[in-house]
Image (tube, rainbow, N blue to C red):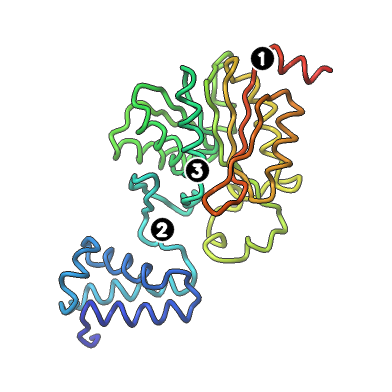
Amino acid sequence: MTSPLTIEAALKAATLQLTHSGSDSPSLDAAVLLCHALDKPRSYLLTWPDKILDDTTHAAFDALLARRLTGEPVAYIIGEREFWSLPLKVSPSTLIPRPDTERLVEVALEKAQTLDGDILDLGTGTGAIALALASELPQRRVVGIDLRDEAQQLASDNANRLHLTNVTFLQGSWFEPLSHGTKFALIVSNPPYIEENDPHLAQGDVRFEPKSALVAADNGLADIKHISDAGRDYLQSGGWLAFEHGYDQGASVRTIMQALGYQHVITEQDYAGHDRVTLGQYNDERGRQCTKD
């Protein structure tokens, strides 16, 4: 039997252990895990700091903490992550939605206001980007595609939980599930863009995420090249293509898109000042002509 422990004491002890293990946010990690064990909101920890944890809760918290101390992401441990103020279920079959990706949603929303038509999210994972856009644009149809069946099912479950009926998720490789002639006003993607030998793959949460959703050949640019090329057949004239990419890939992505005939190609920074999103507009006649010249 474990020794009696208050909420405050449990949080302090867990925070200390997580600090020593190298967590970037030890106090937050401890609070989120304890809330999950208690099945209570964060406010409960502040309201009842002297409450004694029962043996069952104490054991559950210790088990969750042990997983985090090995480096396993909190999102995978509790099975949830918030994105664009939407609570999303996550699993080890998908990437964990990150705040940086909200910049892609912001850019996409700006362009979506400029023309009518459907929206496509490639490599949708949990459905985070597609669901954020669907929640902000309830009159627009949004389609999300992912290669993995587990991801497609998870994204669909998230849509159902959020009661978003204007979004559909399909399973397949990039544009493969779409009917010939399907056109979109906007295509967005957070594709694999990390190089195979990038040292960050052996650090932090990334160690636990699916490598197929992270790594791309050709210096991390293979999937961006493919989507940029094939995407021209699925954009309505004047439609926009927007990517999230690595902080050092802005110039390369602009070069790829411009060579394929995209116009008004620009790179937007995230809130840390790093290149994060590159987008371009495609006019079918002018774009095809550019690639022939």
Task: Give me the C-alpha separation between circle 3 and circle 2.
Answer: 20 Å
Element at label 3: helix
Name the residue carrying label 1: 284
Query: Could you classify mark 2 by the number of other residues whose Cα lies within 10 Å: few (under 14), some (14-19), or many (20 or more)?
Result: many
**Placement of 99 over or under 206, stated as above or below:** above
Question: Residue 47: image x %, image y %?
Answer: 16, 69
Name the residue nearer the viewer: 271 or 201: 271
Q: Which mark is residue 75?
A: 2
Nearest to viewer (mark 3 / mark 2): 3
Q: Quadrant of the C terminus?
A: top right
Question: Residue 122: image x %, image y %?
Answer: 54, 34
Sequence-earlier tag: 3 or 2: 2
**Placement of 273 over or under 38, stated as above or below:** above
Element at label 2: helix
Q: Report whether 273 appears left or right of 220.
A: left
Q: Residue at x 59, y 66 (%)?
A: 203
Q: Residue at x 59, y 29 (%)?
A: 241
